[in-house]
Amino acid sequence: MSEKLVSWLDRRRRMKSIELIQRHLSATTSAVEELHRAVEYRINGDARASEEAVNRVAGLEAEADHLRNEISLEVAGSALPASDREDLLRLIRRVDWIADWAREAARILVWTPLDRIPGDLADLVMAMMAKVRECALNVEKCVNRLGVDLNEALKIADMVERLEEEVDERYLEARGKYPTLDYSKINPGEAILISQLLDAIEYIADWSENTIDQVRIIAIRIS
């Protein structure tokens, strides 16, 4: 079983399935990068540029979703054993959750007054987004190294795990700022949106970690 999966991964450049997987990863990473831009624009008070970036997130998430469906059909029709197909489909679905949560964060961002939050909280939000962006970029690198350099893929997986922990630290620190928000500038409903936005951003990091957990499962099978 594992030998067939190794062979399948080794032919990555000649197989439509692998090309689709790489495009799916690229669309997902780009969605997170656009979210990073949208958040930064919003904090800096450029609502129009933020909205444009949000629209790009939506387009990239839709593209990733379409590619996931194509990948499912390709993998389902491959000669791989059922367990290997399930491993790959589970991996792709976890990557897709990264794009889904980027889209959800973008939806919430549209209504969230980040330009009116305290500077220390804004700094934490941007620090979270920077680490989340790193998570997504390294997930892409990690998956792309499967079947090429397994040891490197696992090293990158460890890096993603460390980045996720750093996101969690900043997330908890940001939550600690909620009781000190100035409600003369932000109403309770807006405070809830801020909380929901940070939750969605944190979920991107969580699903990045979930994805590399699946990479490790595949690595064990093919090692």
Image: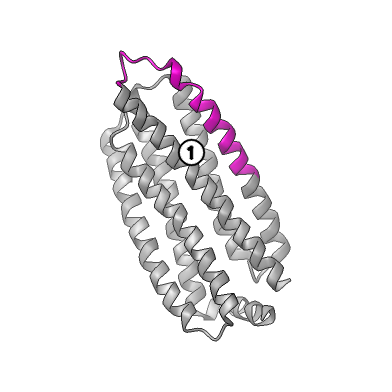
Q: Is residue 163 magenta?
A: yes
Q: Is residue 142 left or right of residue 108?
A: right
| Disc 1 element | helix
Q: Is residue 12 visible?
A: no
Specify the farthest residue to the left. Answer: 48
Image label count = 1
Specify the farthest residue to the bottom. Answer: 79
Quarter of the figure that contains the N terminus: bottom right
Q: Is residue 75 visible?
A: yes
Check disc 1 and give the amino acid type.
Answer: Met
Residue 83 image-quadrant placement: bottom right
State the residue in front, 87 or 37: 87
Identify the magenta region. 162-187
The residue drawn where x is 54% and y is 64% is 91
Q: Position of residue 171 (x, y in %)?
A: 52, 32
- What type of secondary structure mainly makes up the magenta span? helix
State the residue in front, 37 or 213: 213
Residue hosting label 1: 129
Circle 1: is it few (<14), some (14-19), or many (20+) Cα within 10 Å?
many
Residue 37 image-quadrant placement: top left
The residue drawn where x is 47% and y is 84% is 77
Q: What scheme was used to colour the molecule?
A: one colour
Q: Is residue 192 magenta?
A: no
Q: Above or below — where is 108 with respect to 64?
A: above
Q: Is residue 8 left or right of residue 204?
A: right
